[in-house]
Image (spheres, rainbow, N blue to C red):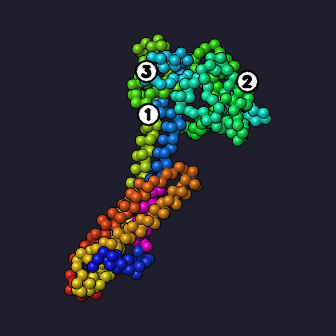
Amino acid sequence: MNFLATLRVALTALRVNKLRSMLTMLGIIIGVGAVITMVAVGGGAQARVEDQIKSLGSNLIIILSGNFTSGGVRMGSGTQLTISEDDAYALAREIPSVQASAPTLRSNGQVVFGNSNWATQIYGITPDYLEARQWEVISGQALDQAQVDSAAKVVLLGQTVARALFGDADAVGETVRIRRVPHTVIGLLDRKGQSMMGQDQDDVVLIPISTARKRVLGGTNVKTRNVQNITVRVRDGDDVAATEQEMRDLLRQRHKLQSGQEDDFFIRNLSEVLAAQEASSKILALLLAAIASVSLVVGGIGIMNIMLVSVTERTREIGLRLAVGARSRDILTQFLVEAVTLALIGGLIGIALGAVASYAVGHFAGWRTEMNAASVLLAFGFSGAIGVFFGFYPARTAARLSPIDALRHE
């Protein structure tokens, strides 16, 4: 008997018991659907981390001002401005692996245009900040050093601020007031999205650090060159950890700290933080897929159980086929094809169920999900393997039946 004839006989046997066949496939359907859904959820989490890495900029290190002690109480980070613009320039000048080092002042404030106003983050920056953050200007022009040197009253708008003040209109060339100081909009920043802490990175305005110090922020910032943080980008291919240690050594030397003294600044390697988060997301995705795969094994056990029942019910039929010339391998192939067909049909239905479930999770729960062809093919192939593995024993049992004993079976 050729394979097509065997397949036809197997499909006919499955159609005779439609309800039983459907119930047998149920475990495979749920298993494949669960695997695809869980992998899609895990893939979405990984993609979100990758987006955060892109939005922050690669090989990024943040240096924060340190703390101080008052009345025996240690204050938190940033309570005293212990780093300066000169520190930032020294890092870029003396450490070859530093590509960009950007000192930053920041505060909150109201931005006004006409009758519209918006409370946002105000950042005083240098041109190196855009390079360090890999932040493009999609309309207008970027900040240049001449504008920093002259404390020019110019501003770059984040997407959120531009939309709040101007809607769909072009903001470039317009004048906005930042803390009552008029600034000309020279450019619109590209969209960054949310940070890993959930903060809207586009809800920001960028002005020259000299302008922020002298005209906008005021206070003690006017008399000093101290800053809240320094954003550093390490050159691609260079060792970020080694650069971090070089930066620490240089800053300790500049701040005249003795060997026993603690750092008066904090260094945060965001690349390491995000890499750890990405690794955690991958482990979570694998764990979810492994848990969901248990359903496939349960479905395979169901297939084995039903196929054994089918062999018992069709013992006389098997004996008759063997008596008229069918070979043992024909019987083996028939029952094995039935088991694999059940598994593969269940796999196809499970793929459709997984796609619907992934969309539902993303739509109703608000989670990001990403289906990929590899996970679909893997789940489908695994369902076929389940059919072969759990269908082989019942098929072999049927193939080993004696024709005489089978014909006598009641």
Q: Residues within 10 Å of mark 3 (few under 14, many from 20)?
A: few
Measuring 43% from the left and 37% from the top, which residue is drawn there?
275
Quickly name the residue at label 3.
96
Image x and y of residue 292, in percent: 42, 57
Measuring 49% from the left and 13% from the top, which residue is drawn there?
255
Asked if residue 31 is among those painted magenta in the image, a careful observer would answer yes
The region drawn magenta spans 22-38
Asked whether, in this view, residue 121 is left or right of residue 311, the answer is right
The answer to whether residue 221 shows anywhere in this view is no
**Which amino acid does the dot numbered 3 rest on?**
Pro
Cα distance between the residues tagged 1 and 3: 21 Å
Q: What predominant SS class does the magenta segment belong to?
A: helix
- In-front residue for pair 59/297: 59
Asked whether, in this view, residue 197 is left or right of residue 8, the answer is right
Quickly name the residue at label 2.
181
Image x and y of residue 267, in percent: 48, 25
Mark before the other along the chain sequence, 2 or 1: 2
- In-front residue for pair 390/135: 135
Cα distance between the residues tagged 2 and 1: 39 Å
**Which amino acid does the dot numbered 1 rest on?**
Glu
Q: Nearer the viewer, mark 3 or mark 2?
A: 3
Q: Nearer the viewer, mark 2 or mark 1?
A: 2
Image x and y of residue 48, in percent: 51, 44
The answer to whether residue 336 shows anywhere in this view is yes
Cα distance between the residues tagged 3 and 2: 39 Å
Quickly name the residue at label 1.
272
